[in-house]
Image (cartoon, grey):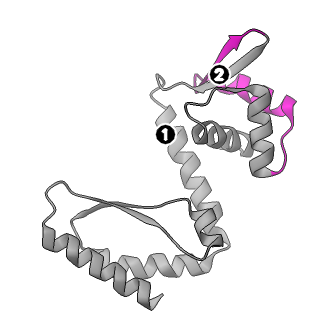
Amino acid sequence: MDKNTLRILDTIASHLGEPLSINQLTEKIKEIYGTAYYPNIYKKLQELKKESIIDLISIGRASIVKLNFRNYLLIDFLSEMEIEKKMEFLKDRSDLLTILAEMDKPFHKKCAIKSVSAINPAKNIRLNRIELLFLLAEKTQHNETISLYKEMQSLQNKL
């Protein structure tokens, strides 16, 4: 996925429910990433529209950009975007890789955990903290939850 597509999809996904014109989208991309050039954004949006990844809805002289959730492949594009963001985020942060490796040891065989996600990692790293969201299996026993909590407390004290 090219840089412009990544930035566009990330910005649109970050502002779901907030109608963004192409001009507003360009401004948001510039705020987040430091640079944005309207003609490049416009051209990329036209390509994404042809691929049915986004919809452009004309309202007066402006066009509102929305993700096309009717497209079966949109979820794949968003997943790819998240993977690339994660790789870029972790590239220069070997200390985070250590934390993830330490977490993997006690949690590797815990069948209660379905998924672990970091919440707003860029902001939290600047604040020297990490917030995690654990999704547990539906029929998780109370003692498994307590065990996970104790493991996290232990990791927190260690790291």
Residue under numbered circle 2? 49
Label 2 secondary element: helix
Residue at 58% x, 22% y is 52
Q: Would you identify the image quadrant in which residue 14 lies?
A: top right
Q: Give the side of residue 91 with respect to residue 138, left or right.
A: right
Amino acid carrying label 2: it is: Lys
Query: Which segment did they paint magenta?
Result: 34-60
Q: Position of residue 105 (x, y in %)?
A: 35, 81
Camera-side residue: 28 or 78? Answer: 28
What's the distance in space between the residues labelled 2 and 1, CA to CA? 16 Å
Camera-side residue: 118 or 71? Answer: 118
Q: Position of residue 74 (x, y in %)?
A: 51, 33
Camera-side residue: 7 or 143? Answer: 143
Amino acid carrying label 1: it is: Asp
Residue at the limit of the structure toward the top, as seen here: 60
Q: Position of residue 17 (x, y in %)?
A: 55, 30
Q: Position of residue 88 (x, y in %)?
A: 65, 61
Mark 1 closeness class: few <14, some 14–19, many ≥20 residues within 10 Å: few
Q: Which mark is residue 108?
A: none
Q: Would you identify the image quadrant in which residue 67 lies?
A: top right
Q: Is residue 56 magenta?
A: yes
Residue at 55% x, 76% y is 96
* For residue 80, above or below residue 49: below
Residue at 62% x, 63% y is 122
Residue under numbered circle 1? 76
**Image quarter (top left, top right, bottom left or bottom right) of the N terminus:** top right
Q: Give the side of residue 141 with respect to residue 88, left or right.
A: left
* For residue 41, above or below residue 95: above
Precedes in sequence: disc 2 or disc 1: 2
Residue at 46% x, 22% y is 70
